[in-house]
Structure formats: structure tokens, C-alpha cells
Image (cartoon, rainbow, N blue to C red):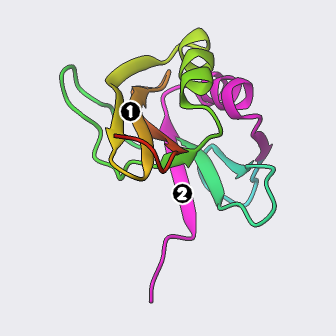
Amino acid sequence: MPAPCYFEIHADDCKRAQKFYGEVFGWSFSYYEAADIEYYRIEVNEPNGMRGGLLKRPGMVQPMQSPNAFVVTILVPSIDAYTEKAKAAGALVALPKFAVKGMGWTTYLIDTEKNVFGLFQQDDNAA
């Protein structure tokens, strides 16, 4: 069956986005010269972790317009700790933590580039 194998983050300021994701998740970035645009490969630094890319946003997002994108949710060991870490790095809470009954906890945040992303913590006792 087809499954996601790669993700991309669009950014108004690629250096600011690298700082945010580096501080929060420890990801590293390398410039990809073969692209015709400002593009960085993302290494999530986890064995068998999904690879990704970071690029200069190809179009302007207008005030009150949501970017058109899929939301990537990141598995973390502590949703509270990572929410605080993300907020300290400049994130805003889009949707506060809520239970996914019998599975875990989820929250949605907005990064420094106005992109929504999710955090998920496994917890079979979530209710």
C-alpha cells in the first residue's frame, strides 16, 4: 500500500525555521544545491526516521489565509515537555492537548513560519 515517505516544510525565512526545528526536535539541515530554489534536506536524526525537506515558501500567504498543506504529526515521549519547548522557540498553540481515547494525547501548534504541525504522545490510558 502507498504510504508517506517524505515531508516538506515551507518557510518564509528558512534560517528561522531551521533554528526552530533544530531547537525543538534536534533536527539538522544541509543545503541542497541541485534544487533551483532555496532548499535544505532535513535529517531527523532517528534510525529509520522519515526524511524531509525545508524550502522557501513558493508563494505568499495572505493575512487570514491558511497555508494549503498536509499536517505532519511528530511522535514525542512527552507532549507537555515538547509543547513547552516549542512555545519557548516561538510556537503558538493552535489546538490545546486533547485525548485520543485509548491511544494517547495530541496537540496542534503553529511554527514560526505559520505552519500547523501536531505532536502525539502514546498513552493507552488516555481518556
* Residue linked to disc 1: 108
Tag shown at residue 22: none
Q: Looking at the figure, which quarter contains the N terminus?
A: bottom left
The vertical placement of 46 against 57, above or below, is below
Percent x, y of residue 10: 48, 41
Residue mark closest to the camera, 2 vs 1? 1
The vertical placement of 101 against 27, above or below, is below
Pointer 1 local density, CA inside 10 Å: few below 14, some 14–19, many at least 20: many
* Residue linked to disc 2: 7
Percent x, y of residue 58: 42, 43
Q: Is residue 109 magenta?
A: no
Pointer 2 local density, CA inside 10 Å: few below 14, some 14–19, many at least 20: some
Percent x, y of residue 43: 76, 51
Which residue is located at x 67 percent, y 27 percent? 24
Name the outermost residue toward the front. 125
Q: Is residue 16 magenta?
A: yes
Do we see residue 115 in this rendering? no
Do we see residue 82 in this rendering? yes
Q: Amino acid at mark 1?
A: Tyr
Instruction: Give, as a single range, the part of the protein colored magenta.
Output: 1-30
Q: Is residue 62 left or right of residue 118?
A: left
Which residue is located at x 29 percent, y 30 percent? 61
Mark 2 and mark 1 in contact? Answer it, CB < 8 Å: no
Q: Of callouts 2 and 1, which one flags the residue occurring earlier in the amino acid sequence?
A: 2
Which residue is located at x 48 percent, y 28 percent? 12
Q: How many discs mark residues in the rendered view?
A: 2
Query: Distance between the Cα atoms at labels 2 and 1?
Result: 17 Å
Q: Secondary structure at mark 1?
A: strand
Q: Secondary structure at mark 2?
A: strand
